[in-house]
Image: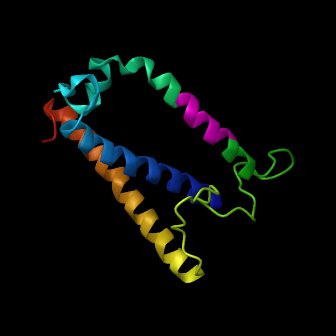
Amino acid sequence: MKFYREVELKHGRVAMLASLGFLVGEQFHPLFGGDVDVPSYIAFQETPLQTFWPVVALLISVFEVFSVFSFNSPFGGERWSIRSDYENGNLGFDPLGLRPSDPVEFKDLATKELNNGRLAMFGIAGMVGQELATGEKLF
């Protein structure tokens, strides 16, 4: 069950960033003269961002490789299981000190993050679906 919670948390975080980027990117685009006037789902094809995506993939792969260390060994153990001492979503990176020290407050904040991530997953799917159906920008 810990594995699925970790997966849901990661996808929720990505969806929250994607939703924000989708909305802001259509209204404010400082790159390429700001004249990118196409729906978000095809904007990267209309600009020279194709050379940018391999760099993004490399950066993401670095974080994903380090997340492998949170798994139990697949040899002789349960597949797709996370160590019992691993705390879901804790990347060990909190430079602003936003993580609450009180366990009750942390559980409340983690539940809010999970629920917002779930909503963002549906939200970004709806935004992409709307642009695909209409062929126009959201706003």
On the rendered structure, is 131 left or right of 81? Answer: left
- Residues 137 and 122: in front is 137
Q: In the picture shown, does residue 89 fall above or below 31?
A: below
The image shows residue 111 at horizontal and vertical percentages of 47, 70
Q: Residue at x 63, y 36 (%)?
A: 62
The image shows residue 73 at horizontal and vertical percentages of 81, 48
- Residues 113 and 127: in front is 113
On the rendered structure, is 111 left or right of 129? Answer: right
Q: Residue at x 45, y 25 (%)?
A: 53
- Residues 55 and 19: in front is 55
On the rendered structure, is 97 left or right of 129? Answer: right
Residue 61 on the magenta segment:
yes
Residue 85, quarter of picture: bottom right
The image shows residue 57 at horizontal and vertical percentages of 53, 29
Q: In the picture shown, does residue 106 fall above or below 127?
A: below
Q: How many marks?
A: 0
Please give the range of residues in magenta.
57-65
